[in-house]
């Protein structure tokens, strides 16, 4: 990667319906489906035809039952989802927010999925920084759920974590959220119960805290929002989820169909010379994207909770699950510009790297030249003195010893012997810092949250996951060091999310970060040590967890309190 100023990643970028338990299905054809049996049963996930199948696992099935909300119901019995609306809100406004079942069309086929207010993605909530709005939430899906307002430093009781800040909202239930747009930036909302199912089926949307200063960002012709996602679909529909625990617990559930703003055919029309500011959010369960705009230079302006100290150029934007980036692109030549996920994929079985590109959308650049020429402003990289002044208060914490140290680890239970042997073999080979693609779809599918336990381990006490509970005082500035131990059967990168606070990624592997930005989610690559400086300003009981949905639901979370 050409530019190491983006934190951490830029250096790495080059039970609804009938259920038949897996134990009852041994020997059944993986292709069996409701049309054959009237029951929802497992079928093999889509496989890359170039990847060999491990011997001995062709007949294996996950040791949990399959789950597919709305299974057996005709999608045409439900209303079609509508494109996202923008709700411009003022301080004190009150809205109703409903999670419900909708009909979605993806790549020409109809599916039953979930939506907020019947829209995909959910409504964009836009309000001035500092505003508080009331969201009266109604749950009309057949699963308990909550809404987490990801990245916002709001009151703890509205953070949306079941059994920590609130009781689950049962089907037919309601909850009143007070949502404070605390810091200028782009945020998103999603469930915090069975995210691997509910979020994957469409429960997500953006929030934008509008800056009070009209010159907070540079001048552009327009602003657009890109929500990047993927979904796992075969010729018979959405591949079922696990009922009592997630499948795909080793690597997370990678989809094979790319979605931008909930669609497979995202298209934007602009005039020649137009400068567009994109607010980009990754809502995928597990996939880290490497975003490109047809080779056009990308100006990186901001991330989760703030601008960068200084703007930078890059050729691509690596973005992990739950991260957000604010970037600007000028389209100065007429024609079609592809928006792509451009990665260096890996085939673990053959030990090969190969380039891979997914089309995420297209920008159609017209022949007519835009009226206002912003080329000079776009070509200028701004130094953000306001950010530097804010960060000056925290630099004294960068070099001190960490207050807490975490190790990221993995425990494997009763997986098929062939899978264990394969992972033991791979352990001595090259392990990529970030896995951009599902390198072992069958093995990954067979691993569930009942066999795989991802671990946050306190290196001082040996406590793990929810046995950890740290206590801090309001106003504390805490240095946290995280080591992603590569000495596991299948080490993985982890996007680490801290609820309710903001933090700085100050260094990776002892190299200081030369361009800081306030974050709430950042990736910890395999074999790396990352230092975070966390500002504890928001009282309450909060969570730290991996934002790969299947890792979270396989145990990878801890709690802390701010008094």
Image (spheres, helix red, strand yellow):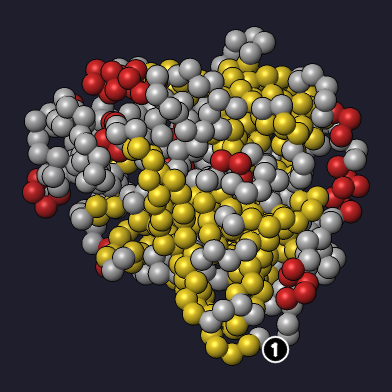
Residue 398, by quadrant, is: top right
Residue at 71% x, 19% y is 404
Check the image and report above or below for 199 versus 513.
Answer: below
Check the image and report above or below for 519 versus 327.
Answer: above
| Residue 513 appears in the figure | yes
Q: Is residue 436 left or right of residue 292?
A: left
Residue 368, by quadrant, is: bottom right
Residue at 60% x, 69% y is 224
Residue 231, image x and y in percent?
A: 37, 52
For numbered disc 1, what is the local secondary structure? loop
Residue 391, image x and y in percent?
A: 86, 42
Q: Is residue 361 left or right of residue 273?
A: left
Residue at 76% x, 19% y is 403
Using a 10 Å C-alpha cutoff, classify the residue at mark 1 as few (fewer than 14 neighbours), some (14 to 19) or many (20 or more): few
Q: Residue furthest top?
A: 461
| Residue 473 appears in the figure | no
Residue 137, image x and y in percent?
A: 56, 54
Check the image and report above or below for 164 versus 355.
Answer: above
Name the residue beneath numbered marker 1: 371
């Amino acid at each position: 990667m050409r530019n190491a100023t983006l934190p951490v990643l830029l250096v790495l970028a080059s039970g609804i319906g009938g259920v038949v338990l897996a134990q009852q299905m041994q020997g059944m054809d993986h292709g069996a489906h409701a049309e054959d049996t009237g029951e929802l049963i497992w079928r093999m996930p889509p496989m890359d035809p170039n990847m060999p199948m491990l011997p001995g696992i062709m007949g294996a099935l996950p040791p949990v039952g399959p789950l597919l909300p709305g299974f057996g119901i005709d999608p045409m019995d439900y209303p079609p989802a509508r494109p996202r609306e923008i709700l411009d809100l003022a301080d004190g406004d009150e809205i109703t927010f409903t999670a419900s079942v909708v009909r979605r069309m993806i790549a020409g086929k109809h599916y039953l999925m979930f939506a907020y207010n019947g829209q995909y993605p959910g409504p964009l909530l836009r309000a001035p920084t500092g505003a508080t709005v009331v969201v009266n939430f109604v749950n009309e899906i057949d699963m308990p759920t909550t809404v987490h307002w990801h990245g916002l430093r709001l009151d703890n009781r509205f953070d949306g974590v079941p059994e920590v800040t609130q009781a689950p909202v049962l089907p037919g239930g309601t909850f009143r959220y007070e949502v404070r747009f605390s810091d200028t930036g782009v945020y998103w909302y999603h469930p915090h119960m069975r995210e691997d199912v509910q979020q994957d089926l469409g429960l997500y949307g953006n929030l934008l805290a509008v800056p009070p200063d009209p010159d907070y960002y540079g001048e552009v012709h327009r602003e657009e929002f890109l929500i990047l996602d993927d979904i796992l679909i075969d010729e018979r529909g959405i591949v079922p989820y696990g009922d009592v625990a997630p499948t795909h617990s080793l690597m997370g559930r990678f989809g094979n169909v790319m979605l931008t703003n909930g669609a497979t055919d995202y298209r934007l029309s602009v005039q020649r010379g137009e400068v567009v500011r994109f607010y980009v959010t990754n809502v995928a369960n597990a996939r880290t994207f490497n975003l490109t705009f047809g080779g056009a230079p990308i100006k990186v302006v901001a991330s989760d909770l703030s601008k960068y100290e200084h703007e930078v150029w890059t050729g691509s934007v690596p973005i992990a699950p739950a991260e957000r980036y604010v970037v600007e692109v000028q389209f100065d030549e007429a024609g079609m510009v592809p928006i792509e996920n451009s990665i260096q994929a890996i085939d673990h079985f053959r030990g090969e790297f190969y380039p891979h590109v997914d089309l995420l959308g297209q920008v159609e650049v017209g022949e007519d030249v835009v009226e206002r020429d912003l080329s000079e402003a776009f070509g200028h990289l701004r130094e953000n003195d306001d950010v530097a002044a804010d960060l000056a208060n925290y630099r004294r914490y960068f070099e001190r010893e960490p207050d807490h140290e975490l190790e990221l680890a993995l425990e494997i239970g009763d997986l098929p012997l062939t899978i264990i042997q394969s992972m033991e073999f791979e352990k001595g080979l090259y392990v990529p810092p970030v896995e951009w693609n599902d390198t072992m779809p069958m093995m990954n599918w067979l691993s569930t949250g009942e066999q795989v336990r991802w671990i946050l381990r306190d290196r001082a006490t040996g406590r793990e996951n929810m046995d950890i509970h740290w206590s801090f005082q309001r106003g504390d500035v805490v240095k946290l060091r995280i080591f992603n131990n590569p000495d596991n059967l299948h080490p993985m990168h982890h996007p680490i999310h801290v609820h309710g606070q903001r933090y700085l990624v100050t260094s990776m592997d002892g190299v200081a970060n030369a361009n800081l930005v306030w974050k709430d989610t950042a990736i910890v690559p395999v074999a790396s040590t990352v230092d975070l400086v966390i500002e504890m300003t928001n009282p309450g009981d909060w969570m730290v967890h991996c934002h790969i949905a299947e890792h979270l639901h396989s145990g990878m979370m801890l709690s802390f309190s701010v008094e």
